Image (cartoon, rainbow, N blue to C red):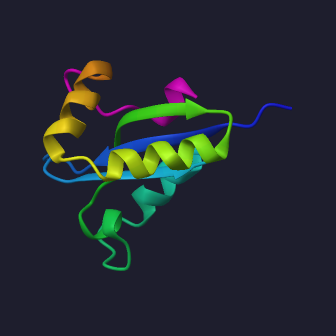
Amino acid sequence: MQHNYYIYIVTNESKTTLYTGVTSNLLKRILEHRENKGEDKTFAGKYYCHNLIYYEHFTDISHAIVREKQIKGWSRAKKIVLIEKMNPEWEFYDPYNFL
C-alpha cells in the first residue's frame, strides 16, 4: 500500500505571507486552513494563509518532514524561487482540481 504525504505552501490573498506545512491529506488540510482564516489561534489563520501555491508529494513521512523543515528554514527569497519554478504566476490551486 502506497502512502501519500505532502509538503505545501499557502499564502494570503495579497501574497505577502507564506506558510509551509506537511500533511497526509492535502485537500482536507487546505479546507482546514480556509475554515481557520482570521483565527488568531493558528499562524495560517491569523494571516489568512489558505491559498495553495506550491506542493510536493512523498510516499515516506520522514522524507516529507525533512523537506518541510528544510523549506521552513529558508529565506523568503529562496522560497519564492522554489514556488516560481512550479507556479510562476503564483496562481491559487484549487485542491479539488488536481488531487
* 49 relative to 45, above or below: above
Left or right of 24 in this view: 38 = left
On the image, the x and y values in percent for residue 20 come to: 37, 50
**Does 27 appear in magenta?**
no
**Does 95 appear in magenta?**
yes
| Front position in the image: 17 or 31 | 17
**Residue at the spot 21% in from the left edge and 20% down from the top edge:** 88
**Residue at the spot 13% in from the left edge and 39% down from the top edge:** 77
Q: Quadrant of residue 91?
A: top left
Q: Main secondary structure of the magenta part?
A: loop
* 72 relative to 67, above or below: below
Q: Quadrant of residue 79?
A: top left
On the image, the x and y values in percent for residue 6 come to: 55, 40
Is residue 24 visible from the viewing direction of this image? Answer: no
| Front position in the image: 81 or 41 | 81
On the image, the x and y values in percent for residue 14 come to: 13, 47
Is residue 18 visible from the viewing direction of this image? Answer: yes
* 51 relative to 81, above or below: below
Q: Which residues are the magenta region?
A: 88-99
Left or right of 4 in this view: 89 = left
| Front position in the image: 91 or 65 | 65
**Residue at the spot 35% in from the left edge and 45% down from the top edge:** 71
Q: Quadrant of residue 1?
A: top right
Position of the C terminus by quadrant: top right
* 63 relative to 23, above or below: above
